[in-house]
Image (tube, rainbow, N blue to C red):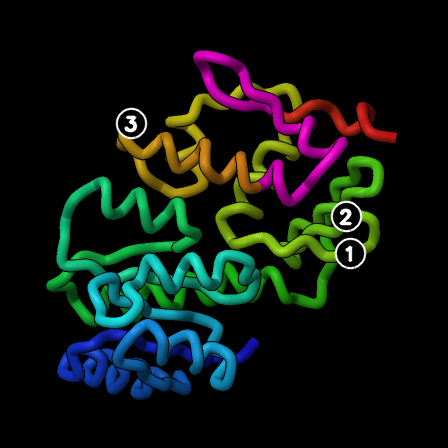
Amino acid sequence: MNKKVLVVDDEQSISGAIAYALRREGYEVDTAGDGEEALSKVQTFRPSVLVLDVMMPKLNGYDVCRRLEDRDDIGIILLTVKNDIVDKIIGLELGADDYMTKPFEIRELLARVKALLRRLEKKTGESIGEVLEYGELRIYSERRSAELKAEELELTPKEFDLLLLLLSHPQRVYMREELLEQVWEMDYAGGTRTVDIHIQRLRKKLGDPYQNMLQTVYGVGYKAVPAGSYP
């Protein structure tokens, strides 16, 4: 896949420094100064990764995430000056893949961009690898894609990770905290709402009857029903 990164920040000193560091690592980089310009450049520049500031004029980073809700091929790293757990949860619920709190080390941001690209590359790889089949739903683990009735499902990276984990272990009951730790690599209990939001979105995208494969275990968490339940 391409190594294009779009850096969105209304502070030119910050976006310029990030862009310079990314270019030195071999990435093709463009910048935007506000949310509206970011949405426009997503269409023309077609980045693989979006490094997105939250506090911006016109449209903030959360608004940009909302407009890109159905994207399935763009990784998003949010930048925020706030170190509030609520702000991080909001970003994750809107489909962001990662976040960093300002001020941050450029080297750490570069490492996170590289790691996110590796995850996205697995989705677009040539190898099919293991295939999980639930009736007309197919999950391709290595290339990180899902098809329902021969049509590709538009899943964000975290939606795919959550679906794959649950379907790979049918009848295994996962507590919300476990899912948060394994899918998002976080361990704070306050973020469990993020799991609920992603389950709701997955159910909506799967539709009837497949949304029923993701079952709520009240007071505990979630589980997937066995594959044989869907002809």
State the quadrant of the N terminus: bottom right
Element type where label 2 sits in the image: strand
Measured from the top left, where is residue 217 in percent x and y? 54, 15
Residue at the spot 67% in from the left edge and 33% down from the top edge: 211
Cβ atoms under marks 1 and 2 closer than 8 Å = yes
Q: Which residue is mark 2?
A: 148
Give neighbour class at mark 3: few <14, some 14-19, many 20+ (Cα, 10 Å): few
Choose between 169 and 94: the one closer to the eye.
94
Residue 218, placed above or below residue 78:
above
Query: Could you tell me the amino acid type at mark 1?
Result: Glu
Residue 219, placed above or below residue 110:
above
Q: Which residue is mark 3?
A: 189
- The residue range painted magenta reads 202-223
Where residue 167 sits, quadrant-wise, is top right
Measured from the top left, where is residue 26 in percent x and y? 38, 86
Q: Earlier in the sequence, mark 2 or mark 3?
A: 2
| Position of residue 35 in the picture relative to residue 141 (left or right) | left
- In space, the residues marked 2 and 3 are separated at their CA atoms by 33 Å
Where residue 116 sits, quadrant-wise, is bottom left
Where residue 96 sits, quadrant-wise, is bottom left
